[in-house]
Image (cartoon, rainbow, N blue to C red):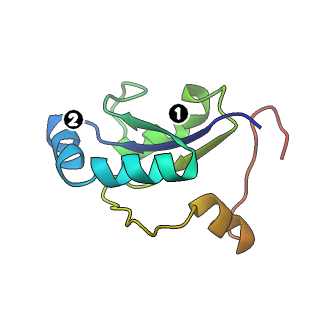
C-alpha cells in the first residue's frame, strides 16, 4: 500500500513561523498517533506566478512514491482525540482515492 503522507503548505517565513508556533505540535502528535509521515512544504513546488493554491496540483508528482497523500489546510489544529481522517472520509463515502498509475 505504501506510505501515508500528511502534508500542508506553510510557504514563506511568516506562514512557516505561524504554523510552527500554533500547529506543529498537534500535527506531529496526530501523525504519530495514526502512523502518517508528516511533511510540511515550506517552499513552492513549482515557481510560477499562479496562486499558491495551484501548488496542490504538484502534490502527486512530489509524492510519486507515496501510497496515500492527505492534504490538510495549515490552519488546522488537531485535538488529542482527532480521528483518522482517511478512515472517517472513506466510511462516509466522501473520499475518492486515485492511486498513481491508474489504480483505485
Name which residue lies at 54% across and 27% down. Answer: 62
In front: 72, or 52? Answer: 72
Residue at the spot 45% in from the left edge and 42% down from the top edge: 54
Which SS class for mark 1?
Answer: helix
**Badge 1: residue crowd in 10 Å (few <14, some 14–19, many ≥20):** few
Say if 89 sits above or below 99 in the image: below
Q: Nearer the viewer, residue 87 or 101?
A: 87
Report the Cα–Cα distance between label 1 and label 2.
Answer: 17 Å
Q: Position of residue 32 (x, y in %)?
A: 48, 46
Q: Dot 2: few (<14), some (14–19), or many (≥20) neighbours within 10 Å?
A: few
The residue that appears at 54% across and 39% down in the rendered structure is 57
* The N terminus, quarter of image: top right
Mark number for residue 43? none
Residue 36 as seen in the image, left or right of residue 51: right
Mark found first going from the N terminus, 1 or 2: 2
**Percent from the top left, x then y, of residue 102?**
83, 38
Please state the total of marks drawn on the protein image. Answer: 2
- Secondary structure of the residue carrying tag 2 is loop
Q: Residue 12 carries which label?
A: 2
21, above or below 79, in the image: above
- Which residue, given by chain and number where applicable, does mark 1 sit on? 58
Q: Nearest the camera: 78 or 19?
A: 78
Can residue 63 be seen at all in this image of the molecule? yes
Amino acid at each position: 500500500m505504501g506510505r501515508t503522507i500528511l502534508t500542508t503548505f506553510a510557504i514563506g517565513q511568516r506562514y512557516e513561523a505561524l504554523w510552527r508556533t500554533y500547529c506543529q505540535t498537534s500535527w506531529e502528535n496526530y501523525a504519530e498517533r495514526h502512523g502518517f509521515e508528516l511533511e510540511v512544504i515550506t517552499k513552492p513546488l513549482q515557481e510560477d506566478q499562479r496562486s499558491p493554491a495551484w501548488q496542490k496540483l504538484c502534490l502527486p508528482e512530489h509524492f510519486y512514491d507515496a501510497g496515500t497523500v492527505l492534504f490538510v489546510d495549515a490552519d488546522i489544529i488537531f485535538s488529542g482525540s482527532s480521528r483518522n481522517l482517511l478512515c472517517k472520509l472513506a466510511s462516509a463515502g466522501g473520499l475518492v482515492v486515485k492511486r498513481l498509475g491508474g489504480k483505485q
